[in-house]
Image (spheres, grey):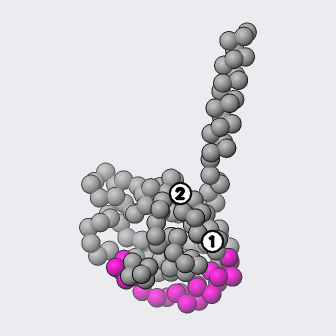
Amino acid sequence: MKKITASFLVITTLLAASASQAQTPAPASFVLCMACHGMDGKGMGAGTPMPMAPPLAGSKLAAFGDGEVMASIVFTGIEKQDTKFVGIMAPLGPAMTDAQMAEVLTYVRSSFGNSAPSVTADQIKGWREKYNGKPMQKRADLEARLK
């Protein structure tokens, strides 16, 4: 009985430690992002030397400014121009409401080692109007905006 109690205490302690180190749970809409960027934000492998998509973890694009650059990417997507990644970034704006996108962008901007300010649904609404119907962006142009 003492071994069972001791084992229970060890397991409980380990679970509590894991829970305290866990990050905020991902919002439901993050499932769209996970398909290519992975649940841990490190980018998904594609069974090839090229990853499916870049990591969100430590992403300068995700953490830049007030979130407009990241929102523009979600609204317009990124066209395929090189062999860095297997896929393209599809425009996902129509798949989320303003509130859902604000929640997802805030989650990414404050998770995976990122520490950028949150994004509001009102900001998303304005950016949706600005980027709706615009062509896919080029990665080089986006990276140039960071300077």
At horizontal 49% and vertical 88% (from top left) the residue drawn is 133
Which residue in the rendered view is the most extreme toward the front?
147
Give the residue number, with chain letter if any, for mark 1: 117
Q: Position of residue 38 (x, y in %)?
A: 47, 55
Q: How many marks?
A: 2
Residue 140 magenta-drawn? yes
For residue 112, the mark is: 2
At horizontal 69% and vertical 29% (from top left) the residue drawn is 12
Residue 122 magenta-drawn? yes
In the depicted structure, whether residue 33 falls above or below residue 40: below
Quick check: 131 left or right of 119? left
Q: Position of residue 28 (x, y in %)?
A: 63, 59
Q: Position of residue 4 (x, y in %)?
A: 69, 14
Mark 1 or 2, nearer chain start: 2
Element carrying mark 2: loop
- Residue 74 in view in this figure: no
Within the image, what quadrant is residue 36 found in? Answer: bottom left
Which residue in the rendered view is the most extreme toward the top?
1
Q: Residues within 10 Å of mark 2 (few under 14, many from 20)?
A: some
- Residue 72 in view in this figure: yes
Task: Name the amino acid type tagged 2.
Answer: Phe
Task: Name the amino acid type tagged 1.
Answer: Pro
| Chain part drawn in magenta | 120-141
Q: Residues within 10 Å of mark 1 (few under 14, many from 20)?
A: some
For residue 50, the mark is: none
Label 1 and label 2: CA atoms lie apart by 14 Å
In the depicted structure, whether residue 134 falls above or below residue 115: below
Q: In the depicted view, which residue is nearer to us: 124 or 32? A: 124
Quick check: 81 left or right of 41? left
Element carrying mark 1: loop
Q: Position of residue 52 (x, y in %)?
A: 36, 60
For the C terminus, give its image quadrant: bottom left
